Every structure is written in structure tokens, then in C-alpha cells.
Image (spheres, helix red, strand yellow):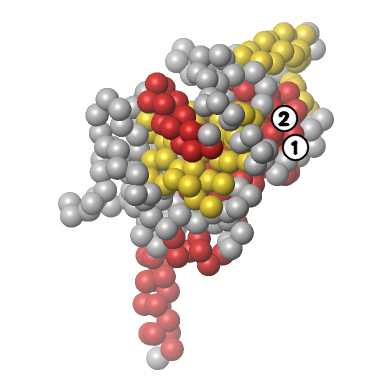
Amino acid sequence: MLAAILIPALFSVSLLTGCAQNGDIALPYDKDTTNNSFRFESNDTYNTAAAFAEDLCIPEGDSSSANEIEAGADSYGSAAFFDIKNKKTMYSKNVYARLYPASLTKVMTALVAIENCDMDKILTADESCVLTEDDVQKIGLKAGDTMTLDQALHFLLIYSANDVANLIAVNVGGSIDGFAVLMNERAKKLGATNTNFVNPSGLHDDNHYTSSYDMYLMFNEAIKYGKFIEIIGMSEYSTVYKNMAGDSVEFSCTSTNRYFRGQVNAPTQVNIIGGKTGTTMLAGANLILLSKDSSGNSYISVVMRAKNADVLYEKTNSMLTMLT
């Protein structure tokens, strides 16, 4: 009798949790959903977040001014602006919508690496680190190349190198899949309930997603580490690593952040500390940013799925203007 009760109950729990024994379960399509074509919603996220973190910013819904369109030439999918000191959400739009993060993923890649590995650990590239696609951001790693984690984090966060993301993954997590497990475990501990990672780079996968609020949770944790803040604040980087033969390989790069490239100016009295960009065709243009006002108070802004880079930085600046 007890087994007859427990078996259906356990089956129901497994359906609710979305766990699968033999692979991923695709998110179902619902013709009656209110979601648009590029996002998914989790209606219970606010209640979950509010229960676990009284010391975090908790959006209670869209800001009254957040009435921009989500389609067209000037569109974006989600945006948020958080006052870290006062734990206040200054702006929010679709913050719990599930979106593709592109290279914003590398925030979590860096966090997991920093928390699980020494900066001077030598990382060695294998074949999974060799990317040959022309349209993929990379430094051109070859099997047998070596560098320290410190060097790798600079390439990861400044230049957004996807082959270096794989390098970190295989050396810290044992494999790309193994590292993704670590990423998801850490994300869940932070309360990032609308997140699932399948790789360390953010190269597109339909089952690789997050939300603006979850990105805030992850970035807010990452900036607790001085090394992370140091690297995201750099506009350029040069170093020498080794190939399989032990020969030196020189590589220099500049930041993907337009604020640091001199292409975009922040509003008056706003100091850009640093951040992470991310762009793919399906994810759109994305940016998470740490900034400070004239009093030195810190803020996190995030914009996801902007139509293009111009819209991305225009929307970011419109939120930063709240500090002037």
C-alpha cells in the first residue's frame, strides 16, 4: 500500500523538477503562453528569490518607466539596474525572462575557476580547446599549449576568448561537461533558478540560458573577488604563454567593452569599473557592468538581447543617467 502511494508521488516530483535519466527534456511549447519568441518565464522566481536572500536586490516587477518595446530596431529583451549598497532595484524590465547569455556566461566560468583553482596553476590545452571556426572569438590555442589560470582569466574576461573558456573548463572541471556541472551547481547555490549552462563560453545551445536577475546574482558574487574586478577593469592585455615545444607565444588583445575602447562615453559623474560583454546572432547584444557614482557607491547594470550594440549601450547609459 505504501509503495502504491510513494511511486506516483515520486513520479510527480520528477516531472516538476524537470530531471531526466536519459537526456535533457526540451522546454514545451504552449500556444497560450504570454512569452515572446525569444524568452521563457518562471512565475515563481520572485518568491524563491525573496525567501533565500534578504541581503540582495529583489525586483517586484517591471519599473513604471520600463515600457519600451521588445521588438523592432530599438528593442531589447531585458534590463535591470541594481544599487548594491542600498539593496535597491532602480530599474527592471523582464528580469526573470530566460534568455541566451552569449559570453555573459564567462562571468560564471571565471567565478567557478577562481573559487576552485590557484592563479598560478598551469593549464594545458587539449583538442577540445582547438577552435577552427572563423567567426568565433579565440586566441588560436593548439593542443599542448600551456598558460597559468591568471593568464587564462585575462583572455577570458577581457578578450572573451572561447578557446580559453574551454581551456579553463577541461583543467578545472576535468571536461567541458564536467565543468558545466560545477557551473550549474554554483548557480543554484546563488539562487539562479532560471539558469542552465551547457558550456563555459556561451556559444549557442538551445538549452543554455539565464536571466538578467540571475546574471546579477552571479556577477554580484564574482565582484567579491579582487582578481575579478582587477581583470574586468582592464582595457588591454599582453602576455606570453608556451606551446607544446616550450616555445614562447606572444598575444595581445583589447577589451570588447566599448566604454574601454573609447567608443562610448558614460554619463557625467559615472565611473565605469568594468564588466562583461556577450554577442551572438540568437542572443543579441548583452552587457553586465559594474559602475560607481560620484560618492563611490557601486551599481550593477545588465541589458540582454539588445537588437545591436548601439541599442545596448544606449539602454545602459539611460540607466546610468539615474546616477547623475
At horizontal 41% and vertical 70% (from top left) the residue drawn is 13
At horizontal 51% and vertical 64% (from top left) the residue drawn is 50
As drawn, 157 above or below 84: above
Q: Amino acid at mark 2?
A: Glu
Q: Does residue 7 appear anywhere in the picture?
A: yes
Q: Amino acid at mark 1?
A: Gly
As drawn, 292 above or below 184: above
Query: At numbered mark 1, what does the secondary structure look like: helix, strand or loop?
Result: helix
Query: At numbered mark 2, what does the secondary structure look like: helix, strand or loop?
Result: helix
- Give percent across and percent down for residue 277: 52, 28
Residue 241 badge = none
Calculate the distance from the C-alpha at mark 1 to the C-alpha at mark 2.
Answer: 6 Å
The quarter of the rendered structure image containing the N terminus is bottom left
Query: In the visual, does 3 lie left or right of 225?
Result: left
Q: Does residue 180 appear anywhere in the picture?
A: no
- Give percent across and percent down for residue 32: 18, 55
In front here: 25 or 308?
308
Query: In the visual, does 138 lie left or right of 285?
Result: right
As drawn, 197 above or below 21: above
Query: In the visual, does 115 lie left or right of 164?
Result: right
In front here: 84 or 185?
84
The residue identified by callout 1 is: 226
